[in-house]
Every structure is written in C-alpha cells, then in structure tokens.
Amino acid sequence: GAGVSQSPSNKVTEKGKDVELRCDPISGHTALYWYRQSLGQGLEFLIYFQGNSAPDKSGLPSDRFSAERTGGSVSTLTIQRTQQEDSAVYLCASSLGVQGAGELFFGEGSRLTVL
Amino acid sequence: KQEVTQIPAALSVPEGENLVLNCSFTDSAIYNLQWFRQDPGKGLTSLLLIQSSQREQTSGRLNASLDKSSGRSTLYIAASQPGDSATYLCAAGGTSYGKLTFGQGTILTVHP
C-alpha cells in the first residue's frame, strides 16, 4: 500500500479482555516496529521485526504483550488480560531495513481504551 | 540509558517568524537523529533524518543540525506558516535499526 495501515483505529475494551492490533507495513519494507504513545510516558519502543524474526523485543512491558509477523508483512500485536494502564495509542512503523536504520514511516495508530 | 529532552515544551509565534526548536540527548553514541511532526490524532511524519556522520540536513524551509559531541540537535523552521502548527518530536537512534528514543515534543502554534 501507499503507507503503513493500522486497524482498528479505535478500540474500547473492558479490563481483562484480550485485544489484537494489526499493522500492514509499506510493501517491500523488511523492518517493522511497534511503539506505544501514552500521556505519561511519551513514545516508547516495544518491539522490532526484521522479516518474521524479532531480534529486539526489549520494550514489551510484560508477558501479557506479544507480537508476531507473518510472510514478512502483516504484524499483529496482542495484549492479553488488558489493564487500564494499557490504554494508549499503539503506533506501527516500517522501514526498508537496510543497515544504518533508514527513515521510519509511521501509521496513524490504534487508540486503545481499557475501561 | 539514553534520555532526550526538547525545549521549549510549547511555542507560539506569529506567521512569518523564523524559529528554532532544541533537542538534547545524553548518550552521544548515536547512529542517527530524526525529527518528526505529529498532527493531533495522527501518526508521525518524518521530516529529516541526520546520520551520525552528518552535520545537517535540509528540506525546503526546514534545516536540522547535529552536534554529537555536545549532544544537541536543532530544527530551524524558516518563514513559519499556520500549517506548520503541530507537535515536533526529536528521536535519537542508538542502534543500526530503528529503535528510537523520543523526546516529549515541542507543541508549535503559528498564528496568522
């Protein structure tokens, strides 16, 4: 596609429910990233994919958070047993993935509200 | 641990002014420094990417400089316009991939 696409754009869920957030990166971009933006913490790195592998998942806040990428393309971020502190905007970005960390292109994010 | 600070937190200027946004980072061992723009309710748009070996980058009315030794970057916006109103974010890249540490941003308002 023309840009990074994320869905849903908005998600309201009840505490304790599981949620899945989807990211469709720019075609041909081998690197994919998830970031989280919250009022208190600003923008934080969650996980990095190169192809289908995740060499850096150091930013995932707890074991309730997981992510996968299939076919070197679409990625899903899953949050299990959601808590109110998980409320944030989850942003996905992709890049060409060449050595040297090129320009990152961000999607418009998925806003998660946990009641 | 890298920390990125942006000053000022907010800035309001009349249209036509030249302005400077400041970014400082604590760990000078960076691969690159990126400036982004974020409009309300939207994602981030990349403005300029400066590799660690570069001193500055220019795009239209925007110019970003990088001084690794002092841990500083500035974004210069010439002849500001109301359409420039947005939050500007600075991010330091400490790895060979896109793991970025972001500042808290500068909220810019340009009034007609």
Image: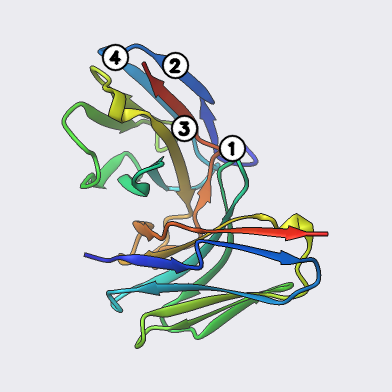
Kindly identify the residue that appears in the image at 20 percent across and 47 percent down: A58
Q: Alpha-carbon distance for marks 4 and 3?
A: 23 Å
Q: Are marks 4 and 3 on the same chain?
A: yes
Q: Quadrant of the N terminus of chain A?
A: top right
Q: Is residue A44 above or below residue A7?
A: below
Q: Alpha-carbon distance for marks 4 and 2?
A: 10 Å
Kindly identify the residue that appears in the image at 46 percent across and 19 percent down: A11
The secondary structure type at the circle numbered 3 is strand
Kindly identify the residue that appears in the image at 47 percent across and 52 percent down: A95
The secondary structure type at the circle numbered 4 is loop
Q: Alpha-carbon distance for marks 2 and 3?
A: 18 Å
Q: Which residue is mark 1?
A: B41
Q: Which residue is mark 2?
A: A12
The secondary structure type at the circle numbered 2 is strand
- In the picture, the disc for residue A23 is 3
Q: Alpha-carbon distance for marks 3 and 1?
A: 17 Å
Question: Are the residues at dot 2 and dot 3 in contact (C-beta closer than 8 Å)?
Answer: no
Q: Which amino acid type is marked by label 4?
A: Lys
Question: Are the residues at dot 1 and dot 4 in contact (C-beta closer than 8 Å)?
Answer: no
Q: Check the residue under mark 3 and report the chain it is in.
A: A
The secondary structure type at the circle numbered 1 is loop
Q: Is residue B29 above or below residue A48?
A: below
Q: Which residue is mark 4?
A: A15
- In the picture, the disc for residue B76 is none
Crowding near the residue tagged with mark 3, few <14, some 14–19, many ≥20 C-alpha atoms within 10 Å: many
